[in-house]
Amino acid sequence: MNSLNKSILSFIKKDCIAEFGTEKGMKIYTDTSVMLTELLENADFRNSNAVEKHLRYYILPEIAFYRAMQKNGVEKEKAYLFLHKELQKTAIKAGKKISIFTILPYFFFIAKWIIKKTMAYYFPKTGWKTEWKVDDKKELAMNIHSCLYLETFTQYGCPEICKATCDTDITTYDSLAPKMIFVRTKTLSTGGDCCDFRFLNGDKK
């Protein structure tokens, strides 16, 4: 089974060919798939289904793609920018899907409930250290003090690509405006002491 086809980057073959030409694009795609298989064979899922999902679907495919581009002569900066561009496509798509629900009455309170449940199940202590700051009718806020993404990217020698992932948060959550306003002032990936997440009730602004 091609693990790449089950990942967030399942669509990259066509884009690689369009960006780098047929021969080089196919080589990058093939190398990404091979590298991902190797990374998965040695991955530590920490006995956590949630950690395994993040590594399989997001983190390791991004590392493999980034490495494969550089292996095939793509300069580091260009490889980062192309990875960022591809991840933004996924964020725009995700944003369009969730924005549909902003028409629901009491959307802010429904979204708050979903966010808290998602954090509890999909972002466990085995991969993240989360500090809840505010939870009221005007705002939901939390700080992330340690993150599986930055930890893993750093472990594999490419901490710089974490920002590309962090930027998808902004693109995705901005789609919820004006019902819910997403505010971020710092991230671990850009040298901050935490990643701050603030979700403001647009009806209370």
Image (cartoon, grey):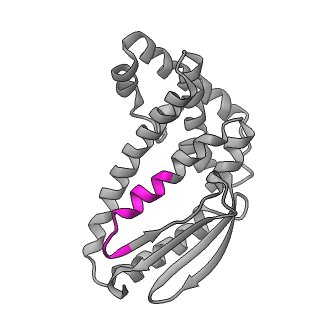
Q: Picture coordinates of residue 176 (x, y %)?
A: 34, 68
Residue at the image position 25 percent from the left and 75 percent from the top? 103
Seen in the picture, residue 192 relative to 204 is either above or below; the reply is above
| Residue 16 relative to residue 140: left or right | left
Residue at the image position 37 percent from the left and 63 percent from the top? 174
Range covered by the magenta-colored residues: 167-180
Residue at the image position 53 percent from the left and 67 percent from the top? 118
| Residue 75 relative to residue 176: left or right | right
Q: Picture coordinates of residue 122 (x, y %)?
A: 58, 61
Q: Is residue 185 visible?
A: yes
- Which residue extends farthest left? 103
Q: Is residue 2 visible?
A: no
Determine the image quadrant of residue 128.
bottom right
Count of marks, rendered view: 0
- Is residue 7 shown in magenta? no
The C terminus - image quarter: bottom left
Q: Picture coordinates of residue 94 (x, y %)?
A: 37, 54
Q: Picture coordinates of residue 62 (x, y %)?
A: 55, 37
The residue lying toward the viewer, choosing from 128 and 53, is 128
Seen in the picture, residue 143 relative to 172 is either above or below; the reply is below
Seen in the picture, residue 39 relative to 128 is either above or below; the reply is above
- Is residue 174 shown in magenta? yes
Residue at the image position 63 percent from the left and 52 percent from the top? 189
| Residue 60 relative to residue 5: left or right | right
